[in-house]
Image: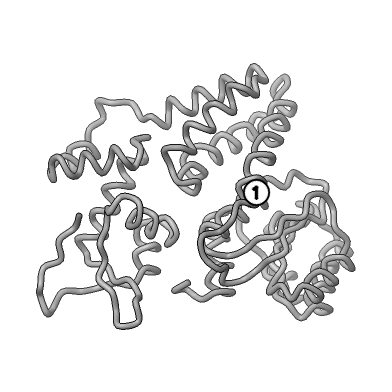
Amino acid sequence: MTRHQDEPQAAYYPIRVVSNETGVNAITLRAWERRYGLITPKRTAKGHRLYTEEDIRLIKQVVSLLNRGIPISQARAMLDHDQNAPDVAITSQAQPSQWHQYREQLASAVQAFDDQALGKTFDEVSQFFPIDIALRFLLIPIYNQLRDTVTQPLGQARLRFYSGFLHARLAWRLSEQQQRAPSASLLVASTSNDDSIELLLTAILLKQMGLRCVWMNGLLSAEQVVECLTTMDWQAALLQLPASADDAQLAVARDIAVESGRPVFVSGAAADSHDRLRQMGVIALQDDVQQSALNIRDMLAGPNA
């Protein structure tokens, strides 16, 4: 779809740079190229993709359309029909965002504890949007909104209802066969009774980035984590710690890292414990699941994975 001008001084960017610049992960960029012919990057002699500034601009236009809830297939049609249309569509405030409508549908379903309506909206969104886009613009914002209203009547129950639904649907997505061999394998488990939905969201994003995540539902002891890592030769562990972890609970992550000899990433721990965890040789993640997934990917598989 894009045209590359034969200019010897043109700048070309690897997929990692494009992903960081646009917020679209490499898996999604490859899918857009393969399924929709949206971008046609140049290739190096070794087959690595290289993108132009025009490609980056186009990707940003597509993301802006996706932000408004326009499916990727329709976004491509708009771009094919009129090269000026994306700029008009991006800046126009006349049309409400389709994401807003989806959020209203999900919120209404959660308010009524209607799992069928919840599933219908989830299936529709999954059909039209990549899972990482759906997570960023719909599923995670709804979860955060519910988490902020737990003190309201039935607020905790509605959060648990939505969290249980996401657990079931995302765990199933996590088990789907990957199209290419994973660049690394992680054990993903919780050592806390806290809600582990953000841990699962991070695992889903990691899978989109080409890593294999072995999801362990429920609590797992330090001994079991170490045995799994060493017996199965998995490259790292992604663990959830309690938000109010004490010294003994922080030491669990340290012991796993020492005894397994593998990198151990932890989420959920309070920010004031991050320095102590780093001193223990454990990698503490921030609250941003997208950035956490990128950091794990870069450390285990390299930025060009």
Relative side of 233 to 179, left or right: right
Q: Quadrant of residue 236?
A: bottom right
Q: Position of residue 227 (x, y in %)?
A: 85, 71
Q: Is 257 rendered above or below residue 1? A: below
Report the number of numbered marks: 1
Callout 1, which amino acid?
Glu
Q: Foreground: 222 or 278?
A: 222
**Residue 272 visible somewhere in the drawing:** no
Residue annotated with mark 1 = 198
Q: Is 119 in front, or is 265?
A: 119
Asked if residue 75 shows in the view, the reply is yes
Q: Nearer the viewer, residue 218 or 154?
A: 218
Q: Residue at x 59, y 26 (%)?
A: 118
Does residue 19 appear to the left or right of 91 in the view shown?
right
- Residue drawn at the location 85% of the way across and 58% of the way down: 220
Look at the image and name its color scheme: one colour
The answer to which image quadrant residue 249 occupies is bottom right
Residues 153 and 35: in front is 35
In the rendered view, would you say 57 is above or below 156? below
Position above or below: 236 against 46:
above
Q: Position of residue 209 (x, y in %)?
A: 51, 62
Dot 1 crowding, Cα within 10 Å, few <14, some 14–19, many 20+: some
- Write down the quadrant of residue 55 in the picture: bottom left
Instruction: Find residue 35 and report its horizontal and vertical position in percent.
Output: 35, 51
What is the x, y in percent for residue 17?
A: 36, 68
Residue at (72, 47) in percent of width and height: 196
